[in-house]
Image (cartoon, rainbow, N blue to C red):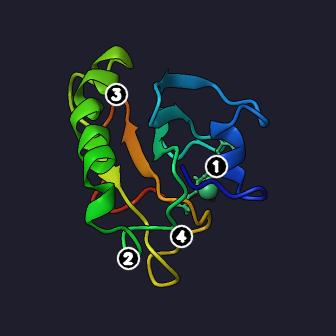
Amino acid sequence: MTTHADCIFCRIARGEIPSRKVYEDDELMAFHDIQPSAPVHFLVIPKVHVENLYDADLQHQQVLGRMMGMIGTLAREQGLDDGFRVVVNTGRVGRQEVYHLHLHVLGGPDPLGSGMPRRQ
Ligand code: 5GP
Ligand code: ZN
């Protein structure tokens, strides 16, 4: 599996940087965002290093499918029974900050508004 020495999410996946883990198995991981944009905000990542959806291809379809397939279970465990938003920032225009593919799962007791919640 390809991982990058200096990539922050590869380092979290390798356990070199601590995180508040939501879920982990051989090929994916979920952990709470360090700077939450909603009352519940966690990230789901593949352990393999792929920069974003622009770079992903069919060799990633299994892990990408599993990431999507797990979100409902993880959201339920986090109490997001009234719904949530999934956001995948991609590239410069998508304001991606960390270039290791990740799904944001955002939820909480109140409606989230029409767009991606922004930090102050
Ligand atoms: P992006 O803009 O790339 O979609 O979002 C990256 C997200 O990763 C941001 O919401 C940011 O708060 C989060 N993040 C960045 N570094 C860390 C970290 O070291 N640990 C955790 N848990 N989240 C991080
Ligand atoms: Zn990485």
Q: Check contact, mark 2 vs mark 4: CB within 8 A.
A: no
Q: Check contact, mark 2 vs mark 3: CB within 8 A.
A: no
Q: Check contact, mark 4 vs mark 1: CB within 8 A.
A: no
First along the sequence among labels 2 and 1: 1
Q: Which residue is mark 3?
A: 109
First along the sequence among labels 4 and 3: 4
Q: Is residue 67 above or below residue 4?
A: above
Marks 4 and 3, how far apart in space? 26 Å
Does the image show residue 70? yes
Residue 98 relative to residue 93: left or right:
right
Q: Is residue 40 above or below residue 34?
A: above
* Residue 8 location (% of width, % of height): 71, 52
Residue 28 relative to residue 1: left or right:
left
Marks 2 and 3, how far apart in space? 32 Å
Disc 1 within 8 angstroms of ligand 2 (CB)? yes
Q: Which mark is residue 98?
A: none
Looking at the rendered structure, the secondary structure element under dot 1 is helix
Specify the quarter for ligand 2: bottom right
Residue under the image location 46 percent in, 46 percent down: 46
Q: Which residue is mark 4?
A: 96
